[in-house]
Amino acid sequence: MIDLSKLYCDLSVDAKFKHSVGEFSIFTQSDFKIEDFNFKVYVIGESHFIESRDMGYQEVVAGRELKSHIVVFDLKSPIFSKSFFRLKSREYNIKFDIDIIHYEKEVIDKFLKSSFIYHKFSNDAVTAIALVKNKNGFDTIHGYPEFNSIVLTKTRFNHYAH
């Protein structure tokens, strides 16, 4: 069993892919589009793996240490944090927000209604992904009842003004 007391995040742009989906256990997967870019999304045993080879973007959130990572969140910490990162690709400003809140089943259930892919693990643990209405990004939710935590991520792609 993986110890999910820490969450590792890694984002890559401009085709500097650091990870392969083969590193992870895949529970479900799907495809989606943002503008003309094809994306693949995987619910992995550790959390989620999303990439677009067309855009040169890769996002991994995992419950185990990655080869490289930009941030680590401690889910056992009594201090819940909010962080965001801004990245620039050749064409896009990419904003990634992460928020950790207390676990509430109602929050999970509401998110699942808008998601297009999800996987329910044992003990009410869940990972789900939803596209945003204006189709410039996606949101994810990760429910960890064993840590009384929900991890929410928001990823947005906005055209970069040169």
Image: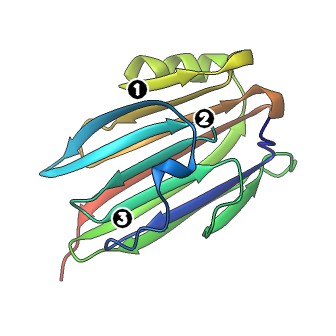
For label 1, the SS is strand
Q: Where is residue 70 in the image (x, y as percent from the top left)?
A: 60, 70
Question: Is residue 116 left or right of 123 when viewed as pictured?
Answer: left
What residue does disc 3 label?
Answer: 94
The count of marks equals 3
Q: Which amino acid does label 2 sit on?
A: His
Tag 1 residue: 117
- Quarter of the image that includes the N terminus: top right
Q: Position of residue 50 (x, y in %)?
A: 41, 48
Along the horizontal axis of the image, is 35 left or right of 75? left
For the residues marked 2 and 1, what is the alpha-carbon distance in whole angstroms? 12 Å
**Local crowd size for mark 2, using a 10 Å CA cut-off: few (<14), some (14–19), many (≥20):** many
- Tag 2 residue: 142
| Residue 22 rendering spot, x and y as whole percentages | 49, 49
Quadrant of image for the C terminus = bottom left
N-term-proximal mark, 3 vs 2: 3
Q: Which residue appears farthest toward the front when viewing the image?
A: 22
Relative to the observer, which residue lies in front, 31 or 97? 31
Neighbourhood count class around disc 1 (C-alpha, 10 Å): few under 14, some 14–19, many 20 upward: some
Near-viewer residue (42 or 145): 42
Q: What residue is at 68 percent from the left and 44 percent from the top?
A: 100
